[in-house]
Image: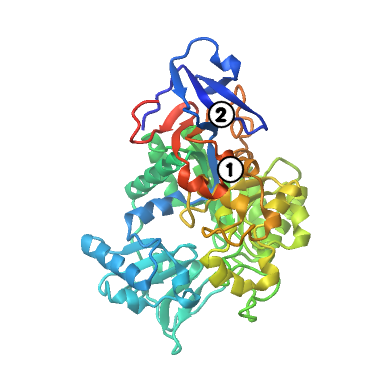
Amino acid sequence: MSRTLFHRTLFHGGVVWTGTGTTTDALSVRDGRIEALGAAALAGTHDQRVDLRGGMLLPAFGDGHCHPDHAGFEAMGPEVRGLGTVEEIVEEVRRHAAAHPETEWIIGGGYDATIVPDGLFDARWLDEAVPDRPVALRAWDYHTLWCNSEAMRRAGLDASTPDTPRGRFARRPDGELLGTMMEWDAVDAVLAAAPARTTEDLVTALAAATEAYAAAGVTWIQDAWVEHGTVEAYLEAARRGLLATRVNLAFRADPVRWREQLAEFAADRERVRMLGDDRLTADTVKFFVDGILENRTASLLAPYSDDPCTRGMPVWPYGELLEALTAVDAMGLQAHLHAIGDAGIRTALDAIEHVTRVNGPRDRRPVIAHVQVLAEEDLPRFARLGVIANLQPLWARTDPPMTKLTFPRIGPDRARRQYLIGSLLRAGVHVSFGSDWPVSDHRPLAGLPVAVTRENAEREPSGGWLPEERIGIEESLSAYTAGVAHQAFAEDERGTLAPGKAADLVWLDRDVRRLDPHEIADLTVVLGTWTAGTRTYLPAHRSGV
């Protein structure tokens, strides 16, 4: 990937949206930084001119929560995402296995859990396609796994295998394992038997994923799930110049071994710092507080509506979470907490409040990601504690996962407390947007309009689901730009356009503020992306500027 940098570049011939409430018609970049706006940008000579052709130049997008390695590997495995029946998935697994006879384990991801009642998939369906090699497929939520009988045999799993506090095995009426595993211990019990990904495989996946982000107008992403073994692949990708975006690593804290992980976190952070590549940082630690609503593992304050025997599955013993979060914060690392249910979110807020009290005040900017079901009394605590709410706007609509799985799980009252984006902004909370890719579409242009309309692809319900939680188009743009920059401690560098800031820019072929929001994703084309003045994306059909 080229990192050619022109000494002085002029962008003109379109609208320049600064993200600060103003627009202009020109912007100049000198040596990777914004030099001037408007008439001042037009003055003097330029090494390069970019005619915006009536389009829109704005701060490059960010993604405050994603999993690029998972996304890269999905593209390399059976392509099951988007398939609408079990038969289609099984046939794709059969095709992939036949095309790759050398592969010992068939591993893929992204199947739609809504196509089978309760999301419970049978190992025997995969046995029909591949009976003699292990097959393991992650659901689109990445909290659930479906495997064949050979995978369970290789992993040593059978009817005698017990559930754990952090993992459940779906079972047949006779107690035999069905082939669907839910959450950490159950999923890991299968995947631990598979060969580890090689560093070269990881480098390939990361290069592909960051290239996809650059093509979507993104220049900074938060990898929200980094294992110790993945760090070397990131370092190698950076050494080779293969990272097409800036990436911040969030090391996953394990409830079982977090104490020994502290030394790993420190060492890995130092390795990244010593590399000195401006596209790679490692300043964050990820905590999974709970699971997800779709498989009843998100933590709720009251029992699930369709299963009064459970309130979900907390991932951490509460005391351990407090101790681990306090230790990580004392190292100067940012906390990034996955919390879906109202009890999970309250636990995350309580833990952050504890850390603030024990370690004292500092600009720590903790992040709670997803913030799906929020208790009304907890909403003001975000601003009071300085917590960033990272939300995935694509989820704020009534799509099949919502109507088939979530609504029955939580009932109508809690359903009305989901993804309160408008309420959080009105309460003065810093909101950043992300995708959780590959769980959902990585393109900001796909998520942007959903926050504005709260309508699904069929434009239903008319006026939006929870219409009081809709936000304006510029607020949505800001959550993808300035909001993510704030999360990254980079608001002085990125997120808005002003002289002196890094030239992280995206060029769209039209002004999205003037479109019907529903048409943004289908009609708008990214024509260019720049990271610190270096072009990281040029459409293949365009050879010039």
* Mark 2 or mark 1: whose residue is earlier in sequence: 2
Q: Quadrant of the C terminus?
A: top left
Which residue ends up furthest to the bottom in the rendered image? Answer: 174
Q: Is residue 130 left or right of residue 482?
A: left
The x, y position of residue 375, in whole percent, is 73, 63
Tell me which amino acid carries mark 1. Tyr
**Relative to 521, does residue 278 appear above or below in the rendering?**
above
Residue under the image location 76 percent in, 61 percent down:
376
Q: Dot 1: within a 10 Å radius of its alpha carbon, few (fewer than 14), some, or many (20 or more) residues?
A: many
The x, y position of residue 389, in whole percent, is 66, 50
- From the viewer's side, name the closer residue of 496 and 331: 496
Residue 361 falls in image quadrant:
top right
Q: Dot 2: within a 10 Å radius of its alpha carbon, few (fewer than 14), some, or many (20 or more) residues?
A: many
Determine whether the residue tagged by mark 2 lies in a helix, strand or loop: strand
Label total for image: 2
- From the viewer's side, name the closer residue of 501 and 283: 501
Q: Is residue 51 left or right of residue 471?
A: left
- From the viewer's side, name the closer residue of 358 and 227: 227
Determine whether the residue tagged by mark 1 lies in a helix, strand or loop: helix
Real-space Cα separation, disc 2 to disc 1, in angstroms: 19 Å
Name the residue carrying label 2: 15
Residue under the image location 51 percent in, 50 percent down:
66
**Relative to 289, does residue 43 appear above or below in the rendering?**
above
Name the residue carrying label 1: 480
Q: Is residue 150 left or right of residue 44?
A: left
Label 2 close to label 1 by CB (< 8 Å): no
